[in-house]
Amino acid sequence: MFSSVKDTFKISNGKEIPCMGLGTWQSPDDVAKNAVLSALASGYRLIDTAAAYGNEKGVGAGIAASGLSRSEIFVTSKLRNADHGYKATLDAFELTLKKLGLEYLDLYLIHWPNPVQFRTTWEFAMAETWRAFEDLYEKGRIKAIGVSNFMPHHIDTLMKTARIKPIRYRHRG
């Protein structure tokens, strides 16, 4: 059992992830910045955000203001639904890094498997999105790649073309 916010567990690629973290959903930039600062000062080392949350700048500002080295903080973000596809994913990833003010992500997730924009082409869009994730992972730009809100049939479809098995991520609350 975990006894501290600094406790970690290993994910499938061998990387360590803190067992507890700060989620920033529905936190505007100014609130996110202060929440990240407070969480990091309290010992939290996992910060979770997403492009769709609209607060990556605030999260990045909190990380920068914390005084901690980048290697001490595990940062997760998620791809916005409208940005599925190979090139769109690469562009969205660069924008996420820019907003966060970071050189890499510890974990990048496909936020949703079947967004409305790709309802009739979701299998192809997801395969191309995952191919971009794999390329970024292999270049060291992301330390771990995974999925959020996926059902078993989404994972099965993804695994038909994936070279790297995704880390499954779910919020508990």
Image: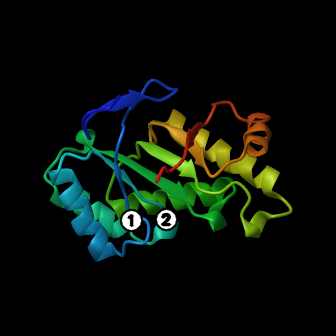
Q: Is residue 7 left or right of residue 156?
A: left
The quadrant in which residue 116 appears is bottom right
**Which amino acid type corresponds to the residue marked 2 in the rendered image?**
Ala
Q: How many marks?
A: 2
Q: Which residue is under mark 1? A: 56
SS category of the residue bearing label 1: helix
**Which amino acid type corresponds to the residue marked 1 in the rendered image?**
Glu
Q: Is residue 133 above or below residue 2?
A: below
2 and 1 marks in contact (CB < 8 Å): yes
* Residue under the point 16% across and 60% down: 65
Q: Which residue is under mark 2? A: 51
* Residue under the point 25% across and 64% down: 35
* Residue under the point 26% across and 33% down: 3
Give the x, y percent position of residue 32: 31, 68
For the view shown, which residue lies furthest in the right direction?
A: 120
Residue 9 can be seen in this image: yes
The quadrant in which residue 59 appears is bottom left
